[in-house]
């Protein structure tokens, strides 16, 4: 079942085409990474999902229209933006309680546990908080709520590495509970750790989408190998790139679709050691990004 379903969604701001036929699907129990360069259309897409903006095309959240049914949808949705603004004269604890009451949530026990995990002081006025502490207010409010959909837009902005790891632990927890998560982040290593599927957006268009494991096969893997017999004739193989040998260690890249064939060929040269490294999400992202600007 699709928790979020966008089909041929477009959005114009005057003469500027912010989104052009966006298609996005988030399934129940899935973590979807939503990535792209600044100005690509990530935030506009999320605002349409939240019902803040109205786009042309077919938009559904829980099978409902986010523009017409925003109030009903938000009862079962938690959202964390990358730039959090709070009421300056309320304490952090009062804001967290307010957000939970708006969703009719009473999970106070887990709220207290999250406050401890994130090393957060809820007694201070919001006007005294740093960016990182304002982010903690939003994260604790969202994660303490028992909902079916979590949308995170640059959620760890302003957090230190320790707090980032706490956030990642919490994402794994809600994933185990069968919840659905849309994660938009420029920290590709974070997306890579957490997401099973990704969608890449550029200039308002989804240029690639699918399970991360499958998308990795569409680009190159790196191979490091030592063999008893020299591999010098491998350099002419059409599937091999960036070939070089240094002190008996042969290194090269190979197209994902040819990986099995190349490994089979290498085995005939008496393998001593073999290491394969799939492309990182950053390499995958850059390969698609560069492809669209050539």
Image: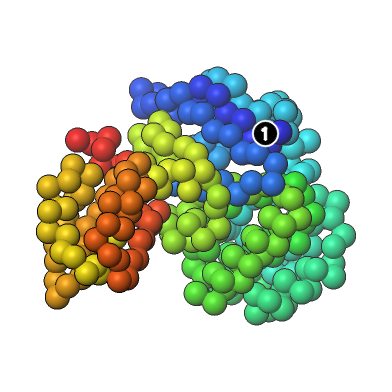
Give the image quarter of residue 26.
Answer: top right
Asked whether the viewer can see residue 18, the reply is: no
Q: Nearer the viewer, residue 229 or 8?
A: 229
Quick one: label 1, few (<14), some, or many (20+) residues within 10 Å? some
Q: Quadrant of the N terminus?
A: top right
Q: Is residue 276 above or below residue 206?
A: below
Q: Is residue 218 above or below residue 2?
A: below
- Residue drawn at x 62%, y 30% is 5
- Residue drawn at x 64%, y 35% is 4
Residue 168, horizontal then vertical, whole percent: 59, 65
Q: Nearer the viewer, residue 133 or 113?
A: 113
- Residue for badge 1: 2
Q: Nearer the viewer, residue 42 or 52?
A: 42
Image position of 42 (left or right of 5)? left
- How many marks the image carries: the answer is 1
Residue 238, horizontal then vertical, whole percent: 18, 42
Q: How is the image coloured?
A: rainbow
Image position of 61 (left or right of 268)? right
Residue 59, horizontal then vertical, whole percent: 61, 26
- Residue drawn at x 24%, y 67% is 227
Asked whether the viewer can see residue 152, the reply is: yes
Q: Quadrant of the C terminus?
A: top left
Residue 233, horizontal then vertical, whole percent: 12, 53
SS at mark 1 in the image: strand
Image position of 109 (left or right of 279)? right
Image position of 68 (left or right of 156)? right
- Residue drawn at x 32%, y 46% is 261
């Amino acid at each position: 079942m699709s928790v979020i379903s966008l089909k041929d969604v477009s959005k114009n701001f005057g003469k500027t085409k912010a989104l052009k036929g966006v298609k996005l699907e988030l399934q129940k129990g899935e973590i979807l990474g939503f990535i792209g360069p600044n100005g690509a259309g990530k935030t506009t897409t999320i605002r349409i999902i939240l019902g803040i903006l109205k786009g042309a095309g077919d938009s559904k959240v829980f099978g409902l229209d986010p523009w017409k049914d925003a109030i009903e949808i938000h009862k079962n949705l938690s959202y964390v933006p990358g730039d959090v603004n709070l009421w300056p004269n309320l304490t952090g604890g009062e804001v967290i309680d307010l957000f939970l009451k708006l969703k009719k949530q009473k999970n106070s026990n887990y709220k207290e546990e999250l406050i401890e995990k994130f090393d957060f002081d809820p007694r201070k006025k919001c006007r005294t908080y740093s960016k990182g502490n304002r982010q903690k207010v939003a994260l604790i409010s969202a994660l303490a709520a028992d909902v079916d959909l979590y949308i995170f837009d640059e959620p760890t902005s302003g957090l230190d590495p320790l707090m980032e790891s706490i956030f990642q632990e919490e994402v794994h927890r809600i994933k185990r509970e069968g919840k659905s998560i849309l994660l938009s982040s420029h920290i590709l290593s974070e997306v890579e750790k957490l997401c099973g599927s990704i969608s890449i957006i550029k200039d308002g268009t989804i240029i690639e989408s699918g399970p991360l494991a499958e998308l990795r096969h569409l680009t190159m893997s790196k191979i490091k190998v030592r063999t008893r017999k020299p591999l010098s004739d491998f350099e002419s193989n059409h599937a091999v790139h960036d070939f070089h040998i240094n002190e008996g260690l042969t290194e090269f890249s190979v197209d994902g679709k040819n990986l099995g064939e190349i490994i089979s060929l290498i085995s005939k040269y008496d393998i001593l050691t073999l290491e394969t490294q799939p492309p990182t999400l950053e390499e995958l992202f850059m390969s698609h990004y560069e492809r669209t600007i050539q």
